[in-house]
Image (cartoon, helix red, strand yellow):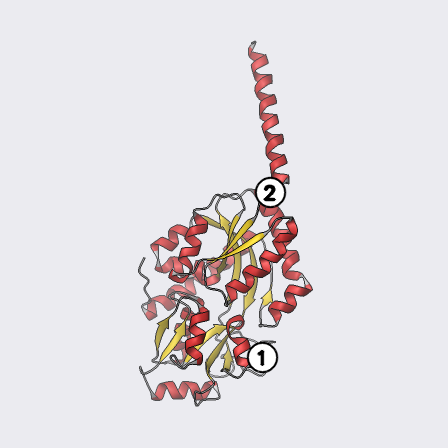
Amino acid sequence: MHKAGWKKAFAALACGLCVVSAARADTYPGKPITIVAPYPPGGATDLYARSVAGGLQELGQSVIVDNRAGASGIIGADYVSRAAPDGYTMLIGASSMFSVLPLLSKRMDSVYQKIEPISILGFNPSYVVVPATLPVNTIQELVAFIKQNPGKYGYGSAGTGTSQHVFMELFKQRVGLDIFPVQYKGSGPMVVDLIAERVIMAIEQGPAVLSNIKAGKLKALAVTTTKRSEALPNVPTLAETVSPGFEAVTWFALYAPKGVPKNVIDKVVPQIAKTMASPEVKERLGAVGVEPASSTPEAVVKRQADETALWKDVIARSKISLED
């Protein structure tokens, strides 16, 4: 064949491949999608995962929520980082997983390099909670109680390097408390032990504790945001009581393996925005004090970077470590 003919044939083939690729892009999703929640059922991550799953199903395929708990979320994140970057395996990640854990774990830092954000999903105020049986009724009384018993009691955490852990360590540093961490594999089992008074307090997100607060099994003494929570408007903030200026907010985001096609992001991001703005999701998440949200991938990257410096200092002061 003449050289010009080869060029025309190659161009036609390339064009054909582009058409096929575009056609495949337009069919996303063409099979079920898996959303990995890296903590056990019952916590905030699981609630977000099921809300996102319901919204993404509107794209025409079933969506499976896969709870892969362990190692402060690293097991689930690692699983997603090894998946094909085709948009069929995604991760619901808490802010601590990407602004705290990479500072503690070489494994998590490696995982972090292999995934990319898609959208913020929402913001969670956290509450200082104690068992209903504990003889304190205000945050001031709790601080005094712990200071009268230095080193005697433990607080509950959903895992080393989680928001529950670093928020509590920040609170300890600001107020001057001597209380040790007791680590669990997620919020669910921690709350069970908190109610039973095996630990005496926790800083925990609304989805994991509000039902128990309303049932009288736990007492909420303060909230970690600078303004009071709409879910519990009578609960004061730490900033207005024992720690001026205190603010710590957990946010959640959707991630995918690095290299996910742009057409997938272009389909998923608007669907996430629609889902998190829907009256049904706003009501469901609002009932547990969550503020639904959405964003661009770039907004997630910026927020992670802005928080890393704060938690790096908290980690250094508290000498937090995590074995890889």
Instruction: Give the percent coordinates (x, y) of residue 297.
Output: 55, 52
* Closest to the observer, 238 or 130: 130
Q: Residue 215 carries which label?
A: none
Q: Residue 30 carries which label?
A: 2
Crowd band around label 2 with a 10 angstrom C-alpha radius: few (<14), some (14–19), many (20+): few
* Closest to the observer, 43 or 152: 43
Instruction: Give the percent coordinates (x, y) of residue 59.
Output: 64, 49
Q: Please state, as top left, top right, bottom left or bottom right, where the C terminus lies in the image.
A: bottom left
Mark 1 or mark 2: which comes first in sequence? 2
Q: How far apart are marks 1 and 2 (CA)?
A: 43 Å
* Closest to the observer, 19 or 223: 19
Instruction: Give the percent coordinates (x, y) of residue 150.
Output: 32, 84
* Closest to the observer, 301 or 250: 250
What secondary structure is marked by label 2? Answer: loop
Per the image, the residue denoted by label 1 is 232
Q: Which residue is drawn at 34% across and 54% down?
A: 106
Q: Please state, as top left, top right, bottom left or bottom right, where the N terminus lies in the image.
A: top right
